[in-house]
Image (spheres, rainbow, N blue to C red):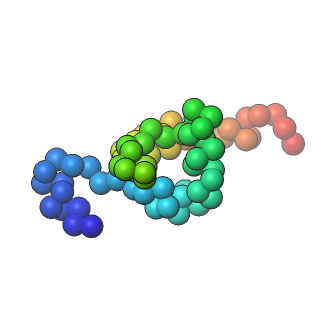
Amino acid sequence: MDTERFAGLGLEPVLTTSELTEYLGVHVQAIYDLRTDGRGLAGIRVGREIRFRISDVLHRLEGMHEPGNAIAGSGEQ
């Protein structure tokens, strides 16, 4: 994909479901299950396929970030 050409049009690159699962290291079914449960990423339907904005993925991941001391501060051994 020529992302520079599309960026000039103001279009943001998107990931396919397969690209997203490869990036996250999860199975495709995990993405579908999360979306079915209402906990998945918002997507853009293109025909029968779903695409995910990179900015949405990064925003969601940032929201899931846990502080480095989360385990140490839990009091569990």
- In this rendering, the answer to whether 56 lies above or below 29 is above
- Residue 42, x across and y down, in percent: 44, 38
Tell me the quarter of the picture where residue 45 sits.
Answer: top left
Tell me the quarter of the picture where residue 75 sits.
Answer: top right
Residue ID at (49%, 40%): 41
Asked if one can make out residue 11 in the rendered structure from this viewpoint, the answer is yes
Q: Which of 37 and 54 is in front in this view?
A: 37
Q: Nearer the viewer, residue 41 or 74?
A: 41
Asked if one can make out residue 54 in the rendered structure from this viewpoint, the answer is no
Q: Nearer the viewer, residue 37 or 11?
A: 37
Residue ID at (15%, 61%): 5
- In this rendering, the answer to whether 18 lies above or below 32 is below
Left or right side of 14 for 25? right
Q: Quadrant of the N terminus?
A: bottom left
Residue ID at (73%, 41%): 71
- Residue 31, x across and y down, in percent: 57, 49
- Residue 63, x across and y down, in percent: 50, 36
